[in-house]
Amino acid sequence: MLAAINEAEKTIVFCANQAHAGLVRDLINQEASSKSVDYCVRVTANDGALGDTYLKQFQDNDKSIPTILTTSQKLTTGVDARNVRNIVLLRPVNSMIEFKQIIGRGTRLFEGKHFFTIVDFVNAYHLFNDAEWDGEPVEPEGGDTGKKGGKGEEGNSGGKGGDEGEDTHNKPKLRIKLSDGKVRELQSMSSTYFYVDGKPISAEEFLKRLFDTLKLPELLESEEKLRSLWANPMTRRELLKKLENAGCHKDDLEKLQELINAKDSDLFDVLEYIAYAKAPVTRAARVETNKGNIYNLLNAKQREFVEYVLRNYVNIGVDELDVGKLSTVLTAKYGSIHAAQQELGSVQDIQRTFVEFQQQLYAEVDVA
């Protein structure tokens, strides 16, 4: 990690838990060129007053020690350290909201600070795809995008331009006929493997196993039953657990989501496609089609909240609709649970709104 940063720059390292943060602190101090025992310190909930003292020293821009803080959850929000130059991720971040909060530790302005660096060891970067937050890409000066077919080169914008911007929907597909007599299509050039009893099998083998061995259509009972279970976050969680117990894990569904070119769709669509050969619907299309029925049930403040949740759903995925994320969502939007209650009512009222709008979200969408 030290090789990826300037050792003199203030850095926050997000670790898996408090014990991990302590281990990382010790390793950094062993490897660092600085001989100060406080070059890298841990600041977590269990560090109490000592941790708070370290944090205040770290926030003091006239002090260079401590230079690196390790933490788990404590510094995700509410830390104003303007001269932080590096954010290091050593633990998975599964929510874009939390990802933004963590990255926000590096966005504070400071004289001479023109950028900060994210060192991502856990592939959290894919949660960065939010144009509304990140802004649109800046066009290169001079108008030369570097793509083939530009002015002064052979061809034109309608000609062949190599592999840039290649539409994956035009790539060759592997057509698999299942026992229902219908064909499912997967990316034919994928090297993705699935594991059953510790042994790797191909995507085609796994798909057939889901359909014929695990009998996915019978397990789900019917399209209507699947839709009903998925539209409620509590029964959705139970269904995913049932599928996991049967041998179909959530990460398997996420792999299949990529293979059927449905990364902008929902895991619900993956299940519908495999079990019933229904074409996937994008999350954005689902929201756009059903938003009228969703918003008709809400007052102005509830609508603002639900719109916020739906933006996260479209940008990230169905995990943003899990009840386990509700407190994180409320804190991110309103600053605290108490502030959210002032806007939306009691915790029970908020939970009811969060659960009930999803019934309308998952109403059947006509993609014809």
Image (cartoon, rainbow, N blue to C red):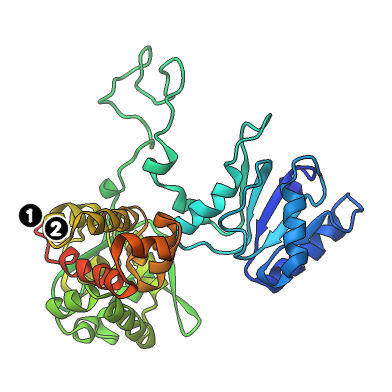
The foreground one among 13 and 38 is 38
Q: Quadrant of residue 43?
A: bottom right
The foreground one among 310 and 91 is 310
The foreground one among 89 and 278 is 89
> How far from the left and from the top, in percent, is residue 264?
30, 55
Amino acid type at image mark 1:
Ala
How many discs appear? 2
| Other residues around mark 1 within 10 Å, as few (<14) / some (14–19) / many (≥20) | few
- The residue at 12%/77% (across/down) is 224
- In this view, the residue farthest toward the right is 35
> How far from the left and from the top, in percent, is residue 11?
70, 49
Q: Is residue 176 visible?
A: no
Compute the Cα span from label 2 to label 1: 15 Å
Q: Quadrant of residue 243?
A: bottom left
Residue position marked by numbered label 2 in the rendering: 290
Which quarter of the rendering shows the C terminus?
A: bottom left
Element class at badge 2? helix
- The residue at 30%/74% (across/down) is 207
49 vs 103, left or right, is right
Marks 2 and 1, the one that precedes in the sequence: 2
Amino acid type at image mark 2:
Asn
Q: Nearer the viewer, mark 2 or mark 1?
A: 2
- The residue at 72%/56% (across/down) is 55
Is disc 2 in contact with disc 1, using a CB cutoff of under 8 Å? no
> How far from the left and from the top, in percent, is residue 361?
19, 63
20 vs 220, left or right, is right
- The residue at 40%/60% (across/down) is 339
Residue 29, compared with residue 85, is above or below; it is below
Residue position marked by numbered label 1 in the rendering: 368
Residue 46, compared with residue 86, is above or below; it is below
